[in-house]
Amino acid sequence: MKKEFLFILLICFAVQRLLTAQITDPKATEVWEPEPRVVTPGIGTAPPSDAIILFNGKNTSEWTHEDGSPIKWEVADGSMTVVKGTGGIFTKKAFGDVQLHVEWHSPAEVKGEGQGRGNSGIFLQNRYEVQVLDNYNNRTYSNGQAGSIYKQSIPLVNACRPPGEWQTYDILFTAPRFNADGIRIAPGYVTVLQNGVVVQNHTEIKGTTEYIGLPKNEAHGKAPLQLQDHGDKVSYRNIWIREL
């Protein structure tokens, strides 16, 4: 047995030497195909050339309320603002893995505290909420503040600007995977930058972001993005998305 082991070890060593000896030209490890397609970056806050523009400051045609009706939020001065009681708005198109850019601000006039200040939310696939909240000098439960994956993951830092100032979320989202039997075989992941600061770093999503109770993992495919009506006059602008 010992001789056989030594023999196999010698063969492996010889093969390794042979393979190493064969790669003497640096061009042997150059890969030319496939060639990445060209995407032109936007200048300043403009979207890249392959982005889907979800809101450009005027046109709300990419959005609908849950019942399919045109949105009733206020559109003015290049932004759209939640109108209390009208309900959340949903993209007409369904998405899977995405890069998402959203700009938002809470009301400049401070009212309330905790979860009652500038509350809204961005629901990826209409299930997984990245919290929108005014947490500038405003304490609330840590897994429910701005930049959190609601009731699941505390943001790494509080990167909030003062109320009334525009804030930016850049989100990278990998959707969860389910097999033919409806069993989740891979979790979703999300990375969030708030105002250029990483607040979620490849965070595993445990399931739906529930207000009460534990996350659920019911099988689904692509699904719309939702912006939440939580009763506060939160405004949004410059929303674009790239499918990955």
Image (tube, grey):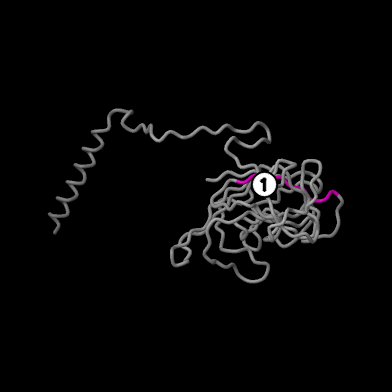
Q: Looking at the magenta stretch, what is its main secondary structure?
A: strand
The answer to whether residue 94 of the structure is visible from this angle is yes
Q: Nearer the viewer, residue 100 or 70?
A: 70
The answer to whether residue 154 of the structure is visible from this angle is no
**Residue 211 % position (x, y):** 68, 67
Q: Is residue 202 left or right of residue 151?
A: left
Other residues around mark 1 within 10 Å, as few (<14) / some (14–19) / many (≥20): many
The residue at the point 72 percent across, 56 percent down is 69
Q: In which quarter of the image is residue 72?
A: bottom right
User: Which amino acid does the dot numbered 1 rest on?
Assistant: Tyr
Q: Nearer the viewer, residue 73 or 201?
A: 73
Q: Which of 16 and 165 is in front in this view?
A: 165
Q: Answer whether residue 106 is magenta in the image.
A: yes
Q: Is residue 2 left or right of residue 205?
A: left
The residue at the point 81 percent across, 59 percent down is 84
**Residue 5 % position (x, y):** 17, 54
**Residue 203 % position (x, y):** 56, 55
- Which residue is under mark 1? 169
Question: Given the current orientation, which residue lies at the most extreme bottom position?
Answer: 213
Instruction: Work out which quarter of the rendered image holds the N terminus and state it.
Output: bottom left
Which contiguous range is marked in magenta? 100-108
The residue at the point 46 percent across, 35 percent down is 36
Q: Quadrant of residue 213?
A: bottom right
